[in-house]
Amino acid sequence: MHDRLDETDEALLARVASGDRQAFERIFAAYAGKVKGYLLRLGAPAAAAEDLAQDAMVAIWRRAASFDSTKAKASTWIFVIARNAWIDKLRRERTELAYRSVLIVSDESADEAPDDAAMRGQTEEQVSAAMAMLSEEQRQVVRLSFFEDRPHSEIAERLSLPLGTVKSRLRLALMKLRTHWEKYQ
């Protein structure tokens, strides 16, 4: 029925959106290696590129219904998904490193120097004050993104929100937090 070899990627994605596994196999065969190569060119280590390529292909399967051929070619849409997965990974790693540096200070033993303890307490108060400035919706996406290390797509799914809304709330929250932290610089 759908054995045409000359079928466009856009048509294949439409079939994937309806749950057609054979169409997905063809998309996977055509793009998995290219996506991994693209991620390697973006600077991802080989193992990470492999994992991210797999994650991107799973996202394609799950989100094929959101593909709009009037806005982009299938290949563009697929590579944007891969690029966004790489960017999300970089953000998580950067946040994790920043979070670990704060934890290193707070995990000090009881022998912590008084000035270090005061500095840690002050930093914790500043973080609490900064988070209190945010709306509940913004706090929610900041907690999920930075403290629970959830990717934007998972946050959107978990909160039943469009991905753009999650990104918008996060961007606005980060702008407010940046303004708050500039007072202490």
Image: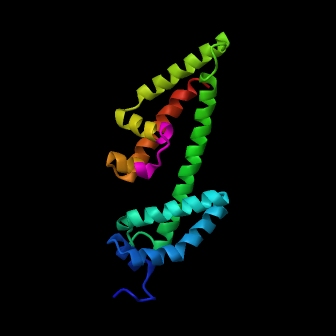
The answer to whether residue 178 is visible is yes
Residue at (60%, 13%) from the top-left corner?
Answer: 118
Query: In this view of the protein, which residue sits in the foreground, 63 or 165?
Result: 63
Q: Residue 177: x percent and y percent?
A: 50, 32
Q: Residue 133: x percent and y percent?
A: 42, 27
Residue at (56%, 46%) from the top-left corner?
Answer: 91
- Dominant secondary structure of the residues highlighted in magenta in the image: helix
Does the magenta-highlighted stretch encompass residue 102?
no
The answer to whether residue 81 is visible is no
Q: Is residue 83 left or right of residue 161?
A: right
Above or below, comparing residue 101 to residue 17 in the picture: above
Does the magenta-highlighted stretch encompass residue 150?
yes
Quarter of the image for residue 15 reads: bottom left
Range of the magenta residues?
Answer: 145-154
Q: Residue 132: x percent and y percent?
A: 41, 26
Above or below, comparing residue 96 to residue 63 in the picture: above
Quarter of the image for residue 37 reads: bottom right
Query: In this view of the protein, which residue sits in the foreground, 155 or 126?
Result: 155
For the C terminus, give its image quadrant.
top right
For the N terminus, give its image quadrant.
bottom left
Q: Is residue 57 left or right of residue 94?
A: left
